[in-house]
Image (cartoon, helix red, strand yellow):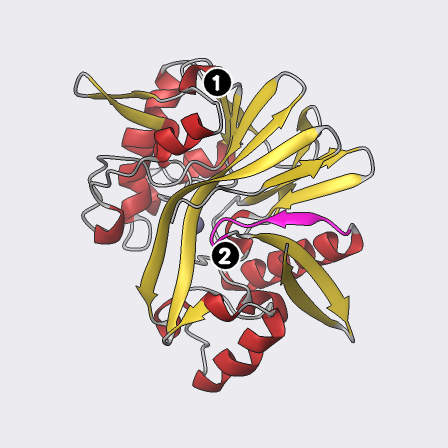
Amino acid sequence: MNATPKIYELGDATITRIEELVLRDFHPGAIFPGWLDDLGAPAQSATGHADSLLAGRLLLSVHTWLVRDRNRVILVDTGVGNDKPRPFTPYFSGLRTPFLEQLAIQGIRPDQVDFVLMTHLHVDHVGWNTHLENGRWAPTFPNAQYIFSKTEYEYFTDPANNNERNKTSFIVQQDSVKPIVEAGQARMIEIDGSQVIDGFHFLPTPGHTIDHSSILFTRGTDTALFPGDVLHHPLQVRRPDLNSVFDAFEDRARQSRRRALEIAADRDALVFTTHFPPGSAGKVLRTDGQFEWRFC
Ligand SMILES: [Zn+2]
């Protein structure tokens, strides 16, 4: 854990992984209901990455991507956060990780962050939006504009949707999103593919959540794709039909996964995933009508 992260270059921008957590205890069948025991071995060798399954357990990561270009500092998704009570997801509850120290190692103080971009508003993507300050949840990045889907926020704060599946998301909005809105630092957007800040487009990839978005970043002819939770594990690149238990709208999740993989392959994009094992970035290749994942 916490090995020196690789620095990727995209034109004049750099992209670096800021680690928060590595999870090693999930049985594949607990995450992927369509899992078959014989899926692991051939798919594992096909990904060229033997570490994505360890002793029959999935290796999953939670982290943030730090993008720096010109004078901007941008974070994509903000992990779980410290000190957050998460009664229904104990592995995310009351964490004390050195996330901000990891950011400091990259030379970034919280007050230097200009933009925080979110693919969706789940527990493991919005956590470091806020931190405890004198007993209350305050924005961790006091000078940042936080950009996310308006529809997603409305959905996870409408009591009509407070059900078994969404119960953690409802707690999360209170301590990790609402304080941002109240501080006047939120910019809630329509997810329609248009450019939101220079070089960054939010593409609609709904299904995992109601208004999940994949974030496309371009510099000249170079493309980076942050697919959020369209993908949880390299096995889904080869098997785009394989939904995770966290995908709320199953058909749309499969359609969005295929779409994101096509964009990644067609544009030869560097893909910065949220949950693939470290170092979590790679490319999607298309051979014989099948997608393949290569870490890079
Ligand atoms: Zn996630």
What are the residue bounds of the magenta stretch?
268-278
Residue type at mark 1? Ala
Residue beneath label 1, please?
A: 144
Horizontal and vertical percent position of residue 162: 30, 45
Q: In the image, is 126 to the left or to the right of 219?
A: left
Residue type at mark 2? Phe
Label 1, residues with CA under 10 Å away: few <14, some 14-19, many ≥20: many
Horizontal and vertical percent position of residue 190: 59, 32
Horizontal and vertical percent position of residue 285: 73, 63
Q: Is 107 rendered above or below residue 220?
A: above
Queried on whether the Cβ of the residue with tag 1 lies below 8 angstroms from ligand 1, the answer reads no
1 or 2: tag closer to the N-terminus = 1
Q: Is 68 rendered above or below residue 96?
A: above
Residue 104 position by quadrant: top left
Locate the C terminus and report the quarter of the image it occupies: bottom right
Task: Assign the magenta stretch its main secondary structure.
Answer: loop
Along the viewing direction, whichever of 287 and 89 lies nearer the viewer: 287
Residue beneath label 2, please?
A: 276
Along the viewing direction, whichever of 38 and 254 lies nearer the viewer: 38
- Judged from the image, the secondary structure of the residue bearing numbered disc 1 is loop
Horizontal and vertical percent position of residue 267: 78, 50
Q: Is residue 162 visible?
A: no
Residue at the extreme bottom of the image, as rendered: 38
